[in-house]
Amino acid sequence: MPETLTRTDGATAVSNSEAPQRLTQTEAPSLAELTEAAGYLDNRAKLLHDDTSELHVDVLMTEWQKSTSGLVRLDMTTLLGRLASLGFAWRDVARLVGVSVPAVQKWRHGKPAKGESRTSAAAILAACNMITRHYPLVQDVAQWFEAPVRLGCPITPLDIYAARMVDKVFLLASGKADPEAVLNYFDQDWRDKYRDDFVVVRSDDGLSLHPKD
């Protein structure tokens, strides 16, 4: 039975050892409610992450386009000289621009280039400048472009850029992207195509990929 107590102001109060227990059961959330709340917060966090990731990519692409617009004012010889100073081979420049090596050689010697080609060269230089500025862990941008995205697969950031997936190149440079997810986006059959064609070889310079004999 509850015990009735008289307070100093003449009112009565009920003392019951079960009251704190009933109060706890009433005010504290149940385990099921905590699970539901945690799931809700997890979903909100994922949605927020997706939204901020999309915003980050949008801002990067806008900056890249703006930087390209500024660099396209330079002549082709200057653009090629800056790419060469970064360490790019002419065959790689030709591939990224989408022309032949002889075309690049002509531009190097002062032959005029079409506006589209000059814009492509400016875009490559703009992307390199942004990677160097925003992602300092990429210490040699030209060599990074030639490094495999994933050990055991010969696909490189250069391949991905040449396919005009520039946003994926930025994500790889940031270190936040899942390499396999990027490769799946680039080519869903990459595992079957390259699984048995290359082997990883350890040397004094580190790990490298070599075609199987």
Image: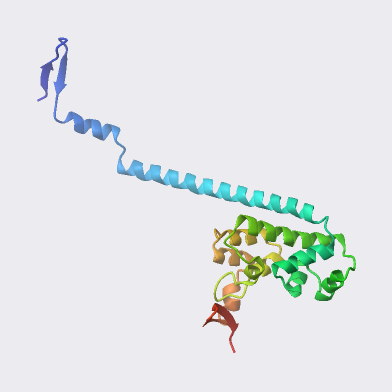
Q: Can residue 117 be seen?
A: no
Q: Can residue 19 be seen?
A: yes
Residue at image location 48% in from the left, 44% down from the top: 44
As drawn, 23 above or below 38: above
Residue 4: image location, x then y, percent: 11, 19
Which residue ends up furthest to the top in the rendered image? 10
Residue at image location 78% in from the left, 52% down from the top: 70
Residue at image location 54% in from the left, 62% down from the top: 178
Residue at image location 73% in from the left, 73% down from the top: 89
Residue 23 lies in quadrant: top left
The one nearer the camera, 26 or 155, is 155
Which residue ends up furthest to the bottom in the rendered image? 213
Residue 14: image location, x then y, percent: 15, 21
Quadrant of the snapshot with the C terminus: bottom right
As drawn, 81 above or below 2: below
Residue 42: image location, x then y, percent: 44, 47
Q: How is the image coloured?
A: rainbow
Which residue ends up furthest to the front in the rendered image? 85
Left or right: where 121 falls relative to 127: right
